[in-house]
Amino acid sequence: MKKIAVIILSAVLCCFATQAFALDVEPSINKNTLQVVISAHESDFGPVNVYIMKPGKDLLKENILLGLHDMKQVIIDMEQSVLEFGFGGTEPSGEYTVYAVSANDTKAAKFTYLNDEDTISALIGQIKSTQTPYDLISENTSVFQVDQKYTDVFLGFSQTQKKHFDTMFKAKRAFATKAEFEEFLISCTVLTDLETATHTTILDRLKFYPVLNISFAKYNNLSATAKTKVLKDMSDMTFGALGDVKSSFDGLVDYYGRSSPESTGGGGGLGGGAPIAKAVFTPSEDEENTNNEEDAFDMQSFADLQDVQWAKESIEYLFGKGVISGKGDNLFMPSDMVTREEFVKMIVEAFNISGGINLGTYADVDENQWYAPYVYAATSAGIINGSDGVFGVGTPITRQDMAAICYRSLQHFKVVLPAYSDDVMFSDINDVAEYARESVLSMAKSGILNGKGNNMFMPYDNATRAEAAKVIYEILKFAKLG
């Protein structure tokens, strides 16, 4: 067939065109096909030979044997005919030429093709240079061979996580080949997910990733208090590599496995001597300034804060620090009520309080529930004490109880509130329970607490999520001053 084609072509190239036809070439690389559409100016045009020539080869006799990629003949008995050639994958990259040859005419069209290897190399080059790697990678996840569980996590990142991923990715870009990129993508995905995990979610995330190669046998044998400390410290860390996660976890498990609750105190954190390998702790006090641009990726602007502008800064700051979380779909639900256990968790997270064991103080606290470590820690610190052997699980927290818990938290850390105004006196102050009255007055005089109109404090009203965030944010500012 090739010899016949050469003979026909030699004759054809010496002839003048008496009939004309149009040639259009449309390669479909994704489907591994090259589609050639031949449009003639009249029907019953007759046979046309179509040649696909490799890059750098034209339709000359000496090129046919080495330069021909494929050839087909079509009988044009209508104004348009379509041919499909197997194409894509391993063919060399470059500019190909499609020739259509009839008895009286020859037309040519060119197209550029990148094979799979060169396409990926070009894409990796773009990813290395772009300022928004997450967007470019998310558009091309099907190109790379990454386990679906990591891809699903990556594609499910929140806006905060996307920004953190971009920051981490651009700081390193430690890859050159496809395999190196895929390994680096998994690493950045896992580290980003762990960076934004909280004390209560990080254990599930650590177990989710087999690439971390973590054994939980020793951890499972720890006391509830020690487990809480391990997870709290892990959630406070930023890791530079996957290996750092395992070494830090193992080091914390060993450290708290040897330490009694009393040896580390009740103030949370590692105290001294915990062996952490290559881990970077959360920013220092100066770096935690809410105006610090480097903390920008920790901030979140929820979509439903329009009516609580007075609490917006507080909510975004505490969210960025992992003290509070949203309700899904980028919503904070600022007017929702806060249960007693939810508020205690916020306080424990905000002040980094650890320690505490189940002394059987509360009949309604299940030690297997998520809130138990927080309740035990706050009780041990003297911040809460319940009533008649009951904590009040599931009960919305009242404004006076919120004030009492916040005030005791400040006292625990020996923070003395200034009295900016001695004239503050709510008209319903006598309605405030005796155990909470000093708390309400002291925090009002320092400007932390406000009334709810008509000079009323409304001590038995339930606190909203926005109110809780605002009060915690304000006492944290005083705690830093103290």
Image (cartoon, helix red, strand yellow):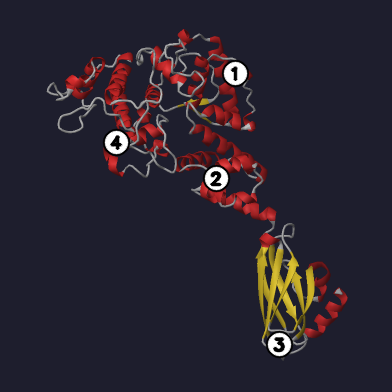
Q: On the rendered structure, is 91 left or right of 418?
A: right
Q: Position of residue 239 (x, y in %)?
A: 53, 30
Q: Report which residue position mark 3 lands on.
A: 43
Q: Report which residue position mark 1 lands on.
A: 220
Q: Residue placed at 28% from the left, 17% from the top?
A: 415
User: Which is more N-terminal, label 2 or label 1?
Assistant: 2
Q: Residue placed at 69% from the left, 87% from the top?
A: 20
Residue type pointed to by label 1 = Asn
| Mark in the foreground, 1 or 2 | 1
Q: Residues within 10 Å of mark 2 (few under 14, many from 20)?
A: some
Q: Residues within 10 Å of mark 1 (few under 14, many from 20)?
A: few
In the displayed structure, 89 sits above or below 466; it is below
Q: Which of the 4 image quarters holds residue 269? A: top left
In the displayed structure, 481 sits above or below 158; it is above
Residue type pointed to by label 2 = Leu
Q: Which of the 4 image quarters holds residue 477? A: top left
Q: Identify the secondary structure beneath mark 3.
A: loop
Q: Report which residue position mark 4 lands on.
A: 311
Q: Choose between 450 and 349: the one closer to the eye.
A: 450
Q: Position of residue 320 (x, y in %)?
A: 40, 34
Q: Report which residue position mark 2 lands on.
A: 155
The CA span between labels 1 and 2 is 32 Å
User: Which is more N-terminal, label 2 or label 4?
Assistant: 2
User: Which is more N-terminal, label 2 or label 3?
Assistant: 3
The CA span between labels 1 and 3 is 80 Å
The CA span between labels 4 and 3 is 75 Å
Q: On the rendered structure, is 309 left or right of 221?
A: left
In the displayed structure, 58 sits above or below 147; it is below
Q: Identify the secondary structure beneath mark 1.
A: helix
User: Which is more N-terminal, label 3 or label 1?
Assistant: 3
